Amino acid sequence: MVLTVLLCLIPVLPLVAPVQYYTLDTPLGKVTGLHLTLESGATIYQFLNIPFALPPVGELRFKKPVPAERWRSIHDGTEHGPSCPQEIPAATKVILQNTELSEDCLHLNVYTSGGLTTTANKSVMVYFHGGAYLTGQSQLYDGSGLALNGDVIVVTANYRLGVLGFFSTGDSVAKGNYGLWDQIEALRWVKNNIRSFGGNPDSVTIFGQSAGGFSVSLLALIPENKGLFNRVIMQSGAFSSAYAVNEKPKDFAITFSYLAQCKNMQTSQAMLDCARRLPLDSIIPTQKNAIRMAMLSPGSLFHPSCAPVIDGELIKQDPMLSVKNSSSDVYTFFQSLDVMAGCVDGEGSLINFILPYMEDTFGFNTSAGVPTSVLRSYFARMIAEELYNNKSNVLKAIVDKFGSSDNEIQARKIVQLYGDIFFYVPMIKALDLHASDNTESKTFQYLFSEQNPLPVSGMPPPSWFPWAEHGADVMFLFGLELMEEMNVPMSSSIKGFVMQFRTYLANFAKYGDPNRGIGDGDRWPEYDSVNRSYIDLTASSISQHQSMYSDRVKFWETDLPRIASTMVTGGAASLTTVRWIGPIILFINYLFWFMRM
């Protein structure tokens, strides 16, 4: 996700005194952080750039992280560290406190408030950022406001991205998932060290948005993580989505190795050795070109190039197969965790990176809407090909359901379709699996419908996009204070709404129930697989509902599979007439979605 503003609160918090410094002892050594006193009298502590693993360089590149070693001198935790290697979008780069890129990036930040004592025993919330597994950095997400409003400790952590985080040959030579292993190592650091900051290592919630949401949902299916966290908040990302896992990692490894001019590509070991020797300054350009080539392959809409993989160790099989087996240890672990999941009501805003590049091909102006030909020739066709074996009756059913002769209405329907396929339906599937016959833990769902006054993931045409865009909930969760400092119009109802949202999430982290201390009118109902209760979050009202987008969900869950089971003839021929468009648009889709998200 591209944030067009910096979520860093050091310069915008209303301070009543100059920034001071505070040094504390940890099992790894002393660390100095920032001590901020606010006008309200509240205090904030920030300990930044704390290493949780050794630099993954040399022989440690493409290996599991090695825990950080004890440092001898006092560690300086007063400034942010470098980002993991990536292509940082220009709008983000100009506002980062630290624009350096380094493989020595496995660092985390700790935010807390009030008295800093080892006996505070506060619940801990560990956040993993989004960015399509290719971009992002922990320094964008300042946890001070959430820590203060929720009386929790907030930890944000980097993890390896792109090729360096997820290169896999699809076998035991290069298993991949290094970025996920980094997240687990960060959680191990929390388990072993957070008590020094006043945290309770036995009350830990992991949360993340987009790729971070996919990540934490996958971590919730790994039984070996038992004891590292108790609760999970999945924001705009669930393990049941096609964006969660790369099912064809070796294809990308071969493409990357070819573009890296590896002399020997005959074996997995040769490709790994070559990638390990590559200089850092050549990895990101080569990765970008490899992604471009991968986008030209059939079906790439449903197969991210750099993402977690089924490695037989961390992720043993398809996540949905694992969790559907009620006798498996994966199912048992998942149901032992309290789970909250939510989406914004405009997840499909991501198509706004795609549509402008389709205009010449299909002859339309995005600001005025989208013609049905885009639905028929691209979105519906890709779904029919990838998920339903090229059946023409499936394509027709999708066009009948989501088509419109009005270009503005058609644009909105495509947004809904995109959100359904990759976010809403996968979220509901994950929640159903968690809530079904579960007497051990609680399940909650939300829909975030408050539009963000600042753009997060693009500039949707206001004439036909009336929703909260992808990432809006994160902007409010972490960026309220910044928006105030930038003089963005913020009503008292918006400010109160953000405080309520933070309180809900912090209550969930502390008690497994967002309702602690909440009035009856704003109570959040538990989710079950029958009623599918959820809460709709807006500044004007917080309301309870059931069966989110029930008509559309029924179409994807029931109607379309039934239609697909009907015998048809001529399916392949009816779709191949527009096959030439696919590779072109697929390239555009992933290039801009991955590079700018």
Image (cartoon, rainbow, N blue to C red):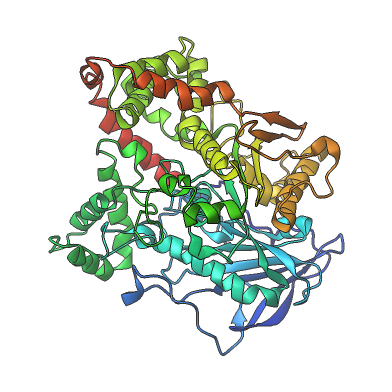
Quarter-of-image position of residue 197 = bottom right
Q: Residue at x 48, y 35 (%)?
A: 350
Outermost residue, top direction? 405
38 to the left or right of 264: right
Q: Residue at x 54, y 85 (%)?
A: 70
Q: Position of residue 268 (x, y in %)?
A: 20, 62
Q: Position of residue 56 (x, y in %)?
A: 39, 72
273 to the left or right of 2: left
Can residue 584 be seen by looking at this rendering?
yes
Foreground of the two, 324 or 457: 324
Q: Residue at x 13, y 63 (%)?
A: 264
Up-down relation of residue 269 to residue 596 (above or below): below
Up-down relation of residue 178 to residue 337 (above or below): below
Up-down relation of residue 515 to residue 468 (above or below): below
Foreground of the two, 389 or 177: 389
Q: Position of residue 100 (x, y in %)?
A: 47, 66
Up-down relation of residue 212 to residue 50 (above or below): above
